[in-house]
Image (cartoon, rainbow, N blue to C red):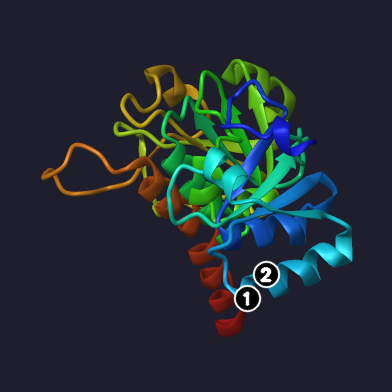
Amino acid sequence: MRVNDIKKYRKKDIYSYSFGPFPTFELLHTKPEITESVLVHSDATEEIRDKLKQECGKTGVKIIYSDRTVEKVRDKDNCIIVGVFKKYSSILEHNENHVVLVNPSDAGNLGTIIRSCVGFGITNLAVIEPAVDIFHPKVIRASMGAIFKMKIACFPYFHMYDQKYGEERENYPFMLKGEYPLGSFKHPENRAFSLIFGNEARGLDAAFRGLGKSVVIPHTQSIDSLNLSLATGIGIYEFCVKRQWEAEEEVIHR
C-alpha cells in the first residue's frame, strides 16, 4: 500500500486503522501478518519510536514517518501513531462460549464489549446485521486493541447463526422481561453457551423469549434499562468468572 493511497477511513475499503500507541502495539503483537505499515507523527516520543523500531524489526512491518499522512487519517489531534492493517474474516469455534450481539449500533459500545469479552475469557463474538462496522477505527480504539484477540463473525440474520451453532450450546437471551433472574440458575458444565444481547435502543425482540432461558438482570425501577456494554459485562462476569469461583469453592469444601 503506497503512502498516497492512505486516506480517511471508509467502510468499503479493505484496510482499517488502529489509532494510538496501545492498540497499534496490540496489532503488532497479535496480528503482524495483516499489518501493512505503521504511521508515525513527529510528536511521537523517542521511547515510542524506539519501541516501534524493535517491534517492526521483528516482523518486517514498514514504518512511515509522515505528519501529513497521520493528520490525513486520524480523527483526533493527539493521535500520533496509526497502524494500517488489512481487514480479515474469522470462523467461530464450535465448542467455545460465544457472545452474540443483535444489531449493535454504537462503535464505542462494541469496542468496550470486545475488551470485556477478552478480559473475562470469551474470544468468540457473533454480530447480527444490520450493525455498526466492526472494523471502524472507533471500535478498534474502544477495544484498546483487544479486537485482534477475538474471532468475530457477522451474520445477516440470527437464525443463520443459530442453525450453524445452536444445537451444540445453551442459549441465554438477555431481556428486560426475561424469565430467569441472573444468578438464579446453574449452566450445565459440559455445554458451551451463547449470551445474546440486543440493540442499544430496542433490546431483543419478544420472540427471543422462546430461545433457551431468557435472562433478566435485576435493577431498581429508577432506570428503564442498563447500558448495553454494562449489561454485557455483568452477564459475562456472572457466567465466566463468578461461577468459576463458586465451582472452585465447592471443590475446596468437599
Q: Which residue is drawn at the image coordinates 83% and 55% (left, top)?
A: 61
Residue tagged 1: 46
Q: Which residue is drawn at the image coordinates 50% and 45% (left, top)?
A: 111
Residue 241 appears anywhere in the view: yes
Residue 120 appears anywhere in the view: no
Provide the secondary structure element on which disc 1 rests: helix
Q: Which residue is drawn at the image coordinates 53% and 72% (left, top)?
A: 245
Please rate how many residues cluster around mark 1, counting C-alpha atoms within 10 Å: few if below 14, some from 14 to 19, many from 20: few
Q: Which mark is residue 157?
A: none
Q: Nearer the viewer, residue 52 or 33?
A: 52
Q: Is residue 146 left or right of residue 204?
A: right
Where residue 170 appears, as percent x and y from the top left, is 60, 38
Q: Nearer the viewer, residue 43 or 150?
A: 43
Q: Which residue is drawn at the image coordinates 55% and 35% (left, top)?
A: 136
Which quadrant of the view contains residue 6? Answer: top right
How many numbered marks are there? Answer: 2
Identity of the amino acid at label 1? Glu
Where residue 220 appears, as percent x and y from the top left, is 16, 48
Asked whether the beta carbons under mark 2 and mark 1 sit within 8 Å of each other, the answer is yes
How far apart in space, not on screen, are marks 2 and 1 (Cα)?
5 Å
Identity of the amino acid at label 2? Arg
Residue tagged 2: 49
Q: Is residue 182 left or right of residue 67?
A: left
Please rate how many residues cluster around mark 2, counting C-alpha atoms within 10 Å: few if below 14, some from 14 to 19, many from 20: some
Where residue 87 appears, as percent x and y from the top left, is 72, 34
Where residue 45 appears, as percent x and y from the top left, is 57, 72
Which quadrant of the view contains residue 189? Answer: bottom right
